Image (cartoon, grey):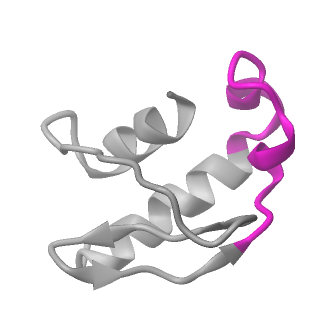
Amino acid sequence: MPLAAAIKKEMGDDTVVKTKCGMPGTVSTEVDGKKSKLECLPLYFFCPGCVSPLCCKSALEKTAKNAAAAAGG
């Protein structure tokens, strides 16, 4: 999963990433009960998983940085 890989790259390989459904078309992350910024329709929503690391790298990195910010890092 490209998003999980981006979060682990930002926060460390020992980070446990779990996914669940939320509001359609949005992404937010939660770290130790602290929610990140809510993103609406990030670019990787429209890319197949096999090409999103190439085409949507900055969007994946933005979500990973939001996760790290929620964690206080």
**Residue placed most toward the observer, 23 or 35:** 23
Q: Measured from the top left, where is residue 6 in percent x and y?
A: 47, 40
Task: Indicate left or right for 18 with 50 as reference.
Answer: left
Residue drawn at x 78%, y 20% is: 51
Of the pair 42 and 64, the residue shown nearer to us: 42
Q: Is residue 11 above or below residue 13?
A: below
Instruction: Tell me where residue 56 appears, x and y as whole percent.
Output: 77, 40
Of 72 and 26, which appears nearest the observer?
A: 26
Q: Position of residue 15 (x, y in %)?
A: 18, 44
Magenta range: 40-57
Up/down of 34 relative to 67, above or below: below
- Tell me, yes or no, whether the highlighted magenta stretch contains residue 47: yes
Q: How many marks?
A: 0
Q: Residue furthest top?
A: 50
Quadrant for the C terminus in the image = bottom left
Q: Is residue 20 left or right of residue 2?
A: left
Q: Position of residue 67 (x, y in %)?
A: 39, 66
Rendered image quadrant of residue 47: top right
Residue found at x 60% / y 61%: 62
Q: Quadrant of residue 69?
A: bottom left
State the residue in front, 35 or 71: 35
